[in-house]
Image: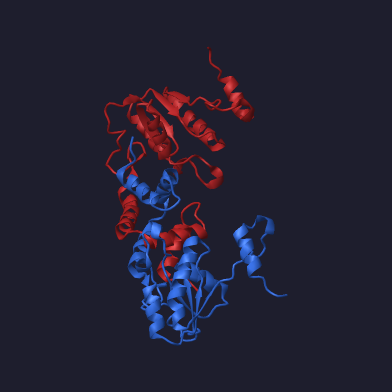
Chain colours: A blue, B red
Amino acid sequence: MQYPLPIAHLIDAYMKLPGIGEKTATRLAFYTMDMPDQDVDDFAKSLTQVKKDIHQCPICGNITEKDVCDVCSNPNRDQTTIMVVEQPKDLMAFEEMGEYDGLYHVLHGVLSPMDGIGPEEINIKSLITRLQKNDAVKEVILALNSTPEGESTSMYISKLIKPAGIKVTRLAAGLSVGSDIEYANSITLKRAVQGRTAL
Amino acid sequence: MQYPLPIAHLIDAYMKLPGIGEKTATRLAFYTMDMPDQDVDDFAKSLTQVKKDIHQCPICGNITEKDVCDVCSNPNRDQTTIMVVEQPKDLMAFEEMGEYDGLYHVLHGVLSPMDGIGPEEINIKSLITRLQKNDAVKEVILALNSTPEGESTSMYISKLIKPAGIKVTRLAAGLSVGSDIEYANSITLKRAVQGRTAL
């Protein structure tokens, strides 16, 4: 026996989400049937709204529902520093931290030749143009993930920017606060020793 | 910093699903943003369709998008037996098993006075009316879960039906196939001994 078609469709739709298999999708579909009409309507609307109303900020690539994102449109932010991140989620993590008040540039990915992702596929060109047009920027902080792809993307961007005389920095690597030395991998330990600071 | 409103709304919507907390909801919302437009549209549509097109079969309470469900409208099913189950999912489990070819009655719940669920809140009345109108039915199989609520609901229905001279049975209780005696709870063992069969 098959599920009634509308339920089968909804199960298929839930299964397209990451980490949701057939069993969970079925449970969610049956749960949806018992949800208040209003909640299901809101859910459906918020799905289409997010696709319709959210776009990349034309300046920095951050996601926003406005013409220009909140960071770029805020004149009180430090206009001399741009932090380059991979994803909007990374930007939000730094905003949550609350210590950084410069600008951002969101790449929406990292270079990964194996996956066919070259410089044209991510927001690198817009970063260069932005720096060329705006000589207020004194420092670019490369805040990419500590993965091989993140590292090589940092190297690539650094080589493009440095000739213009802009300071390029990257995040400190070392032990996570609260972590045990015995559980740290050797590359992390190596970076922690290299970057040791005076007490 | 807040998420852009459309994303915040979608995160809230995902969080209304069972077993999905804020972290997972956020991950799903960001994933949704990167899904193809068509997939998101289909997802939204299937959500509203399931609420609009799926209703209870007026005869047995099974969920269906047709006037009468596939089981009730199939004249080849054994019309003399009705299996009473708690939920449409239970019905589907029995259909998947493929050995049962009688009819069903879906209660959509069990009696649970503590939660305010009395005989009026579940499909008991429609079962009684169905039996009164149709004297082809010779046996009612109570296939409710082995929970205190399931057991007492079975007792309640049994008392209502038996006076009409209809045979009332319930599923065998005993060891799960493939399970170890040492891990079975004592009530299961008791039922297994009581229901022992000749070899």
Visible residue check, residue B115: yes
Residue at (56% x, 26% y) in the render:
B175
User: Please, is residue A57 above or below residue B61 in the view?
Assistant: below
User: Please, is residue B92 above or below residue A27 in the view?
Assistant: above
Visible residue check, residue A59: no
Q: Nearer the viewer, residue B136 or B97?
A: B97
Percent from the top left, x then y, of residue A76? 49, 86
Question: How many numbered marks does the figure carry?
Answer: 0
Residue at (33% x, 58% y) in the render:
B40
User: Please, is residue B66 above or below residue B3 in the view?
Assistant: above
User: Please, is residue A156 above or below residue B26 in the view?
Assistant: below
Percent from the top left, x then y, of residue A128? 39, 78
Residue A107 quadrant = bottom left
Q: Nearer the viewer, residue A159 or B122?
A: A159
Residue at (28% x, 38% y) in the render:
B68
Residue that sits furthest to the top in the current view: B199
Percent from the top left, x then y, of residue B67? 27, 41
Q: Nearer the viewer, residue A182 or B72?
A: A182
Residue at (58% x, 77% y) in the render:
A99
Residue A83 is left or right of residue B100, and the answer is: right
Q: Nearer the viewer, residue A47 or A199?
A: A199
Residue B47 quadrant = bottom left
Residue B63 quadrant = top left
Percent from the top left, x then y, of residue B71? 31, 33
